Image (cartoon, rainbow, N blue to C red):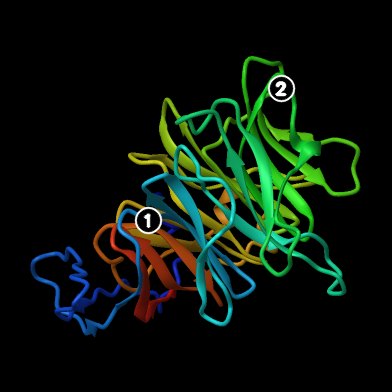
Amino acid sequence: MPMPDRRRRPTTVRTLVALPLPLAVALAVALPAAVAAPAAADTLEVPSLGARNIASAGGYLAWAAPSQSGWRLVARLPGGAVRALPIAAFGTAPDPSIGSDRFAIDGRRIVVVYSRCEGLSSIRGCDVYRFQLNGNDGEERVARLASRGYSETAPSIASGRYTFVRRGAGRRPGVHYWRGDASRPRRISSTVARETATNGTRVAYTYNSSRGGGLAIRRLSGEGRVLRPAARQSTIPRSIVLDRYRATWLADMAAFQTNRLTNARRTADVIVRRGSRPLPAGTDSAGVSMNQITRVVTRLGLVTLAPPLRFG
């Protein structure tokens, strides 16, 4: 992780660590030997061994859970009810994104989007699907994103605007953007990304290159420079969340977040802050609420963090 320019680093930002209490869920955090810090009281909210890929928005959560019939997509509703969605199982863990299908509040559908692929693959023969969480429309294929020559993966949605990745031997693979009233998607990057996240005006995506893993952010309009708050990493950043102002992601067992991106014109304008505490052992992905991480999915299931993981 590239460190911020020392001349601009906020003097109030510190990296804190937390020593967990013995819990029934056996959450453990690896800490440097000589560091002391307050204890954490993380709670296993929903047991789900091997769970992966949490998504959160609008009070909803969704994640992938293994089952005897394959991977299932599980949702936690705002009232706390948890259910496996009534859709077919997946051959590999789906990577969901939650968002709305329009800007307007009236008639807004909260949907979870994901890819369905051939067999046990996560990159071949994939199309984008969506499932309505706040109604009864069920699952449907997003036909406007489908193509004959490509496999569509890594979708995300915000206010009816989709970002996703096209893979294949065609001439225009990479990160694409589709606005619900447009006739067809538009490519905004030739990078064949691992994940995407969108806030309706920007897209963030992770990638691997000959120089290592990285995270890039750019405007959906295609204007301006590409921001690269993480580059030349030994691992590929994961579990990216792009809210209205900031990007958040995980790398190894730590969480990182940018400053407000509103006036960022180049990468030098982006300050990266490390999370205030370590993640629980086995953390796969994280959900962000009010600029802090309140829940994560670990190898044990859905875990609520106490205290939440904050940034700066």
Q: Residue at the spot x=69%, y=64% of the render? A: 262
**Which structural element holds mark 2?**
loop
Q: Is residue 17 above or below residue 66?
A: below
- Quadrant containing the C terminus in the rendered view: bottom left
Q: Nearer the viewer, mark 2 or mark 1?
A: 1
Report if residue 157 is visible in the image: yes
Label located before the other in sequence (2 or 1): 1
Q: Is residue 185 above or below residue 40?
A: above
User: Residue 65's spot in the image, x, y percent?
Assistant: 41, 54
19 to the left or right of 13:
left
The quarter of the picture where residue 157 lies is bottom right
Of 7 and 189, the residue lying toward us: 189
Residue kind at label 1, given as amino acid type = Ala
What residue sits right under mark 2 in the picture?
A: 172
Question: What distance separates the C-alpha of mark 2 from that of mark 1?
Answer: 34 Å
User: Residue 81's spot in the image, x, y percent?
Assistant: 52, 77
Q: Is residue 307 above or below residue 27?
A: below
215 to the left or right of 157:
left
Report if residue 7 is visible in the image: no
Q: Residues within 10 Å of mark 1 (few under 14, many from 20)?
A: many
User: Residue 88's spot in the image, x, y percent?
Assistant: 56, 46
**Which structural element holds mark 1?**
loop
Residue kind at label 2, given as amino acid type = Arg
Q: Residue at the spot x=63%, y=15% of the render? A: 169
Q: Are marks 2 and 1 in contact (CB under 8 Å)?
A: no
User: Residue 125's spot in the image, x, y percent?
Assistant: 60, 26
Of 31 and 92, the residue lying toward us: 92
The quarter of the picture where residue 159 lies is bottom right
Q: Residues within 10 Å of mark 2 (few under 14, many from 20)?
A: some
Q: Residue furthest left?
A: 33
What residue sits right under mark 1 in the picture?
A: 51
Q: Residue at the spot x=71%, y=16% of the render? A: 171
